[in-house]
Image: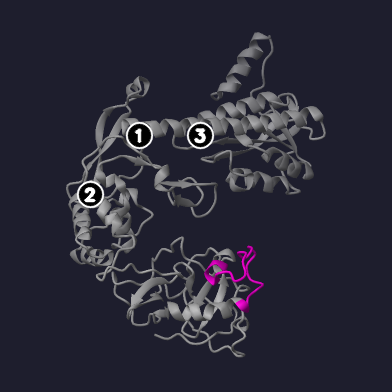
Amino acid sequence: MAALGGRAFVSAVAGRRCGSRLDTGAVAQVGLRFAFYGRMSTSEFQDAVTSRGWQRSVSEELVEGFGAIVVEFFDEGCSRRWSWSDRPAASALLAAAENPGRGFDAVVVGEYERAFYGDQFRHVVARLSAAGVQVWLPEAGGPVELGSPVHEALMVLLGAQAQREVVRARHRVLAAMRVQVRVQGRFLGGRPPYGYRLADAGPHPNAIHARWGRRLHVLEPDPVTALWVEWIFAERARGRSVASLVRELNDRGVACPSSADPGRNGHRSGERWIVRTVAMILENPRYTGRQVWNRQSSKGHGSGGRVSGRGSGVVRSNPAEEWEVSEHLTHRPLVDDATFLAVHGMRTARSTKDGETRRYVLAGLVTCGVCGRRMDAHWVHGRAGYRCRHGYSSAAPRPADAPRNVYMREDRLLELLPGLLAESDDIGSCPVPSGPEPDPIEVLGHRRLQIACTHQGQELWQEAPREITSGSCPQGQTALALDWIPSDDTAYRSASSSEAPQRPTSGRLTKESDLIYVGALTD
């Protein structure tokens, strides 16, 4: 006799005690055919076998006597806040339910909170009901009826309870993490900053976790990379540009962060230093010996999140007022407070040799019409201007076929701005500042417009988030959040010319029929 499974063995014993002999062969399934759906939030801290097992056990108990589970859909590493279309198994279940040849008649869920959050239930059930598929819940004692006032009230209550559970857990966890950083100076995980490595800091303060063998970690200087961090701060404090530091690091063959620690930086190329990498080191307050948390955050779920994360939304930098900083030093600093603050001061507006401070009134409002980047403020020949180098910098050699830099004087743009605005009254949805003669610069900001400059002229573009896709962008160049691109229907005419010249071949511009340029760029 072949070995029986656990359930078959128990059934066989029960059958013998009742004085009957159980046929251990296949038993025909009768009744409704159920599709089981389950979910677990994390795959790193939960056992998939255990989580799936108890959810399926509850589901089988619910449908016992009405049918049997014939197919299974189980999501791992998906938050309940994600919509069903964002969960792989849930979206597959919806697609299968809408297939006329599906192999099940109803969907059973082991627990409401495992599957739904907020008002998700109503939308999912309505979609499944339209396909002729029932939804069974343990909380409802069977199939859910949307037309039943009792079930309607129950689903509202369960949705609010699931939402409350998430909010409560999040609040308690974040509050605990803030205290752990501020009071205890605890390292909360993640990649150690370049120049540091992780060292053992003793057993976990929770006795249960300590018995499980969990240990705390602390940052300690890396004997190889810490010296280069100290060098970067010292050279920057002497007045050297970030680009010159990048050039020297690459010339000396110093390993960049992703090359020095490839195991924790698999999403990076590890080829060379770039300006942004050095700038981020100079901005990191953890090099002062303090533990800092909540410098960045993400909201929602979708594209643009951390490459190695579990589907977080777009990452944003939090203002310094929201940081949590330890009350005491937690590891050996690689830079003193005075040097760190001095380096930060170098990034702000500084007085020139003659004591004046340079001001750029159109900063952030001028866009390159060749590649779509915002143009850099640039002082040349004693006057303000704006230029775009199309993603290239002095930190890397410039290819011979790269497009020419775009440059425009600020005084010239201020002369052209009233005329451009007069010909684009219908652009922008925000109200214009009140007053007899509103400032043209304020009008640009309120109407969310950009002045786009090319080698042929200027025009107004509606501001819109974008990613750089220009062929002129260096390979591997990462687009910044400050970069923008116009859409095809947001380039606007100027009446000072009746014929558009040939547009540049590089970059990404709007349709030719929409472009009529004004004037020519001059030095």
Secondary element type, mark 2? helix
Q: Kindly report the distance in space between the C-alpha atoms of the residues bearing marks 1 and 3.
A: 18 Å
Q: Amino acid at mark 2?
A: Ala
Compared across the picture, whether 409 is left or right of 236 comes to: right
In the image, residue 500 above or below residue 351? below
Secondary element type, mark 3? helix
154 or 390: which is nearer to us? 390
Q: Kindly report the distance in space between the C-alpha atoms of the residues bearing marks 2 and 1.
A: 22 Å
Q: Kindly report the distance in space between the C-alpha atoms of the residues bearing marks 2 and 3.
A: 37 Å
Query: Considering only order in the chain, which callout, 3 or 2, is on the residue closer to the N terminus?
Result: 3
Magenta-colored span: 422-443
In the image, residue 146 above or below residue 343? above
Compared across the picture, whether 496 is left or right of 214 comes to: right
Dot 2 crowding, Cα within 10 Å, few <14, some 14–19, many 20+: few
Residue at numbered disc 2: 338
Checking the image for residue 170, the label placed there is: 3
Q: Amino acid at mark 1?
A: Arg
Q: Position of residue 521 (x, y in %)?
A: 45, 85
Residue under the point 50% across and 67% down: 484
Residue at numbered disc 1: 182
- Find out whether the residues at labels 2 and 3 contact each other: C-beta distance under 8 Å: no
Residue 434 painted magenta: yes
Dot 1 crowding, Cα within 10 Å, few <14, some 14–19, many 20+: some
**Quarter occupied by residue 291:** top left
Q: Position of residue 482 (x, y in %)?
A: 46, 63
Identify the main secondary structure in magenta.
Answer: loop
377 or 58: which is nearer to us? 377
